[in-house]
Image (cartoon, rainbow, N blue to C red):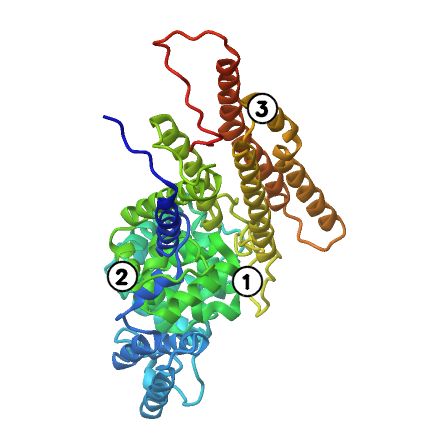
Amino acid sequence: MSVPTPTRATLPLAAPILVMLGLLVGFGAWSLPVNLKSVSPALLRAAGKGTPSLGAYGRDLVDVEKIGAAALVLQAAQATNDPRAPALERALQEFAARQPGLVAWGGWDPFLDPLFNLRATPAGSGSTPIVTFLITERARSALLNTLAQSGSGVVQALLELRQIPGTGRFIPATRPGGQPLETLILLTGLLYQADHVSPSLQRELRGLVDLAVSQRALGDLEEFFVDLLALGRRLDWGQLVELMRRTDSVKTVGRYAHLARIAPDQLALLYAAALFSGSADRVAAYLIEFGKPGVEDLTLALSQGQGAVRQLLLRQVPVNRTGTPALSTGAELALTQPQLMLALKYLGYFLGAWLLLRGLDRWLVSPEGIASLPSALMHMKAGVLALVFAVLLIAATEPFLLKAAPLSEYRPRVHLALDLSNSTVAAQSQPASTMHPSNLISIAVFAALQIVVYFVCLLKIREVARQNVPPLVKLRLMENEENLFDMGLYVGIGGTAAAMVLITLGLAEANLLAAFSSNLFGITCVALVKIRHVRPYKRQLILEGQVEASPVREPNEPSIKSARGSAAL
């Protein structure tokens, strides 16, 4: 019982449906807000939905009288255009009117109040760096007398460091000019005694202090003092305390001090992100890795809410701003099942490309309008071709997949000198972390040209196959079109040459990936045309020509059906 051969009447329905279905599947996969080495703005919006904004978080800080931290959060809220920033500003003004003396300290502290009578601080002084208060002779004497009564072994060991002569970048505390070192020793002891340091940072400081006492030299502890000085000169007591509570290592203290030196204008954003996320370590690691573009990504996350900031810092990847029309449902699923959604996205690319190629083959390439039922080999060839296109789609939609990580402007390169002045260190200019849009456009144009060349070659094969001439004549016609089948190479080389000329003349950004992509697409196109279509069709014509030329054929010998130029997928 023979299988009925599909007729040309099925063409207007089957082929367009496959094409449209492939386009829909591919578009659906493209719109999923999940990426391998980046995060989409849609995902950040979904993560921040329903979570506190900067203005709301700052208002909570005011309610617990942490006005120093709330003041920096207000600056960050104003920088991100938070609609609740005006309400936070009014709350701070009302608190300052009620408790003007606490503004300089950044809030009330039960440990400092008996020593300095915080409420008696003159009004109008504004937020004052804590080092400014503690470096005076009176403040150091009062703090020293209080810490000397401490039962903490670490605090007592810190006080012993005042007598150590082995210092590097500081003058010993007991000599003239040693006030900065003594102030930092006392400030560290104050933070430790008042339990204003995270547990992990406490353990690390305990080890450094014990080592310094045993070796009679500050050693690595001196770097911590340098970093603490940089922060203590920029933050009031309340601000410094809140940062130290969210800092888990001495390394992070150094990173924040470094960022405060080279990016003082961004200090409010960096500080608010540390409080907002609950981890200064993740914020510092993110900015040291991604530099100024990382500040822009962090600012975007801050504008979306607390959940967005935590999601960005948890993943430690840049924001993909290419902008896909993502569905809210897809964004919520990407938050809970990122690996599954990423697998579905890549599978959608493959399936969409396979359906599109099958539909175009039936619509444009098959000489009779529709090919016969495909064999397993033809399905395998279509799958390989779809896989190639899926890989190209993944590379095009993952801008951070193939690029090497650029050098961050904020990455420390040399040890900075002791910072006792108000001067800042200028950040060195570094390459941008994202590819220029003109390069993406040129790659897309080169790919589109090769797709056009590919289908021109397929249409020429169809034209030859539909001619009513013997197979050997068709074979000669195919050989006559060899230059056309090599056109992908010519177009690819021409595109690369044109790109190099534009780069040389300074009319385009120097990017070798964009320039040589034209050549790569050309090689791929010609390989697909000749291996996938031309070679199988020529082999078929040779066999058909031999059959027609044979004078004798056995009765039971199966005849070779003419596919009449079907370039099978």
Question: Is 148 drawn above or below residue 518 in the view shown?
Answer: below
Question: Residue at left 60%, top 51%?
Answer: 442
Q: Look at the numbered disc 2 and give the secondary structure of its residue.
A: helix
Q: Nearer the viewer, residue 179 or 502?
A: 502
Q: Nearer the viewer, residue 160 or 338?
A: 338
The answer for how far apart the CA atoms under marks 2 and 1 are is: 41 Å
The answer for how far apart the CA atoms under marks 1 and 3 are is: 71 Å
Is the residue marked by circle 2 packed among few (<14), some (14-19), or many (20+) residues within 10 Å? few
Q: Quadrant of the N terminus?
A: top left
Q: Residue 513 sits in which quadrant? A: top right
Measuring from the top left, give residue 27's x and y in whole percent: 39, 54
Question: Residue at left 43%, top 80%?
Answer: 127
Query: Disc 1 vs disc 3: which is toward the camera?
Result: 3
Residue 262 circle label: 1
Q: Residue 357 sits in which quadrant? A: top left
- For this orientation, the residue located farthest to the bottom is 97
Q: Amino acid at mark 3?
A: Leu
Residue 475 circle label: 3
Question: Which residue lies under the disc numbered 2?
Answer: 329
